[in-house]
Image (cartoon, rainbow, N blue to C red):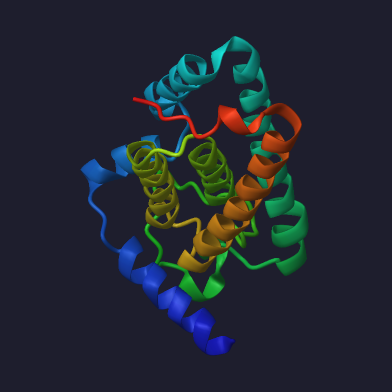
Amino acid sequence: METLLDLDKNIFLFFNALHHPAVDIIMWEMSRNLVWIPLYIYIFYAIYKHFGLKKMFFILLGIALCVLLADQLSVHLFKNVFQRLRPSHEPELTGMVHLVRDYRGGNWGFVSSHAANTFAIATFLSLIFKNRKFWIILFSWCIIVSYTRIYLGVHYPGDIFGGALLGMVIGWGNSKLTFFLFFRQKDVPAKPK
């Protein structure tokens, strides 16, 4: 286990060291929700176009449930249980971590809530929309958001991986529940343009 943790720290330090002041601004913004508003608008449009208003409500409810579960489980079943310090709080890494705007996040980092949330939504929507282009867009979004957390110095790659796994399980389970409760077999698959 110690070897895995050391490897995680070394991978983190490698990627966190790849920084530049101009990129700091970009990574800061990409870690926030506002920059992704055009993607959210596209998702809302695709849902409405392919499912109509009534089913759109149930899909948005499914997305909300994904976020609720991913956010709460990542904190209460992982961060508060494992209590692994974020790299930004790790005394052993003092002076070695590149931070942007001196942002450090909360004390505990395993698992990443950003990764859990984005991967839950992406998995859920990928199973709703069985379309490769849509899948690529969604998971690219997840990877970019997840990488910003390493760049900003607040998560190890292991935190991201754990969050991604948690999110995918939540997204998968929630898609099954949504299909079971609200859709008939003929409703799927849908293909957004």
In this rendered view, identify the residue nearer to me: 67 or 32.
67
* Residue 179 picture location, percent across and down: 67, 36
* Residue 144 picture location, percent across and down: 37, 47
Residue at image coords 62%, 24%? 60
- Quadrant showing the N terminus: bottom right
Q: Quadrant of residue 191?
A: top left
* Residue 170 picture location, percent across and down: 66, 49
Q: Report whether residue 64 is seen.
A: yes
**Direction front: furthest residue:** 186
In this rendered view, identify the residue nearer to me: 70 or 169.
169
Relative to 153, does residue 27 appear above or below in the rendering? above
In this rendered view, identify the residue nearer to me: 138 or 8.
138
Relative to 51, does residue 87 appear above or below in the rendering? below
Q: Report whether residue 112 is seen.
A: no
Q: Quadrant of residue 37?
A: top left
- Quadrant showing the C terminus: top left
Q: Is residue 84 left or right of residue 131?
A: right
* Residue 91 picture location, percent across and down: 55, 71
In this rendered view, identify the residue nearer to me: 162 or 103.
162
Residue at image coords 39%, 28%? 35
